Image (cartoon, grey):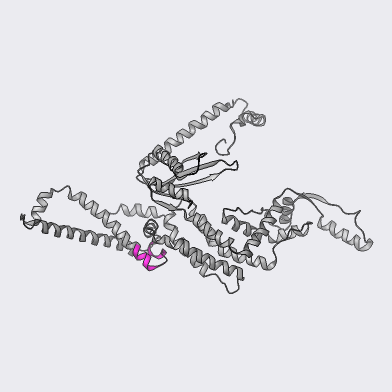
Amino acid sequence: MIVKDTQPFTIVDDVGFRTFVSYLDPNYVLPTRQALKAMVEAKYESAKEHAMAKVEKVAAVSLTSDMWTSINMDAYLAVTCHFVEENEKLSSVLLGVQAFPQSHTAENIACVKASLMEEWGISGKVTCMVTDGAPNMVACVRELKLRHHICVAHTLNLVVKRALDQHPVLSGLRAKARKLVDYFRSSTTVKVCSFLLFQYIMLIVCLYSYCSDLMAYSSVSLKEKLTQVQLQLGMQATKLMQEVETRWNSTYLMLQRLVELREPVGAALAGLHTDIPFFTASEFDIVVACLSLLSPFYDATTELSAEEHMSASKVIPLLKMIEKALQEEDTKSAPAVAVEIGEQLIRQLREKLHMLQSMSILSLATLLDPRFKLIAFFSNTKAAEAVKRLTSECATVIRRNTEENTHEIPQASTSQEFTGGSRLWQRLDTSVMEAKRTQNVSADATVEVQRYLSEANISRLENPLEYWANHRLEK
């Protein structure tokens, strides 16, 4: 309860809680605050030891890191470690969430991260660190001399946010939506006349031209009024959602919820004495069209943010699918605003994200994912470059294995047999032998890569780690 529900240690001193526990078991003695704290700390140390044992067994890890500020304006730095276990299962371990009162310089951030890596024994195992694009984060990774990659979900957020902010019409609709959501989320109490009573009063007005003495109102909050209308319309009661400035997906959710609750919100406003405007029919058309454009971005952001699945190999295919979805949008009947935003999104997507397929860490991950291989790339040229890079990597592995096997054979006898014992021709014969070995390695690497690529892709819903585990066992 303390950990899962974030309850304070003082809960064991609360009279109500003590009475509740006493009803459950009168003989149970609640621990003191100090004892409870010691129990939680012991549980933490046990869990940490277990996590460190898992991390110790793996050969390579990647890290994700971020900083944020709490509502009390306290800064925190978090670092999470990701790796593949022996059973081919993708795992994540939170290395730490530390208060960060010092200046947010690259040097200070790097110092804390280096300390965490040393504590967990992974200083020589980190293959990549993923952060946002903040200059201090980028410089921090450079300070640590690690391979760096900017979070793609964060980049998508910036792309969409820039496209939304640059269009004045949509900015105006978002402002109107925020005002409307604030209105219904407030705790203001209003007087609302029931529909039947309203009809009766109108009848009296028609007959006697006055109704002031007969008006009867019931006081309800704005939230309650919206809930009542939803229930009266046979809908499930749901709340409006407010936009958060730094997260574009909150914009999507806010507008989506307003579209879903178009009828109950309109009905609730009609029964309230307010000058808060709602969307017009043409404005709703714009919002619905924009939501259709933003839907693939929202789905991609959600998928890339999931920890339990492989994500690096999905980046290039997801970006390709987003672009295809934008190109296939029916713009003939769409409002001009939506058409302009769609064009801006495609332009931003190509400017900021097309270059990702040229990055070796992503192109190789995509190529080595048996679900995607070559079909995920934007261009055949980039796909060919990735195949060439993979063949080179494969040749390096084969060459290394060959050299290890060669070291087991006495070099003198091998060289002597190849050169026929002639010291005069030894250098030339050795050069020929090395060239032949290199050609054989390159040919073997090409055969291996082409054999893999010629196989049919597995289903997108299958686990690529299981595929490689099964094929690794093949001899």
Q: Nearer the viewer, residue 448 or 8?
A: 8
Q: Position of residue 53 (x, y in %)?
A: 39, 38
Q: Position of residue 469 (x, y in %)?
A: 35, 52
Question: Where does the N terminus fall, quadrant-wise?
Answer: top right
Q: Residue at x 59, y 36 (%)?
A: 7
First to last magenta residue range: 373-385
**Does residue 381 show up?**
yes
Residue 380 on the magenta span: yes
Q: Nearer the viewer, residue 459 or 240?
A: 240
Q: Is residue 240 left or right of residue 79?
A: right
Above or below residue 12? Residue 292 is: below
Q: Position of residue 334 (x, y in %)?
A: 60, 71
Residue 62 on the magenta span: no
What count of labels does the image hold? 0
Q: Main secondary structure of the magenta part?
A: helix
Q: Position of residue 223 (x, y in %)?
A: 72, 51
Above or below residue 58? Residue 326 is: below
When asked about the image quadrant of residue 313, the answer is: bottom left
The residue furthest bottom is: 332
Q: Residue at x 52, y 32 (%)?
A: 40
**Does residue 321 show up?**
no
The residue furthest right is: 208
Question: Where does the C terminus fall, quadrant-wise?
Answer: bottom left
Q: Nearer the viewer, residue 246 or 331?
A: 246
When asked about the image quadrant of residue 48, the answer is: top left
Above or below residue 271? Residue 282 is: below
Q: Residue at x 50, y 52 (%)?
A: 305
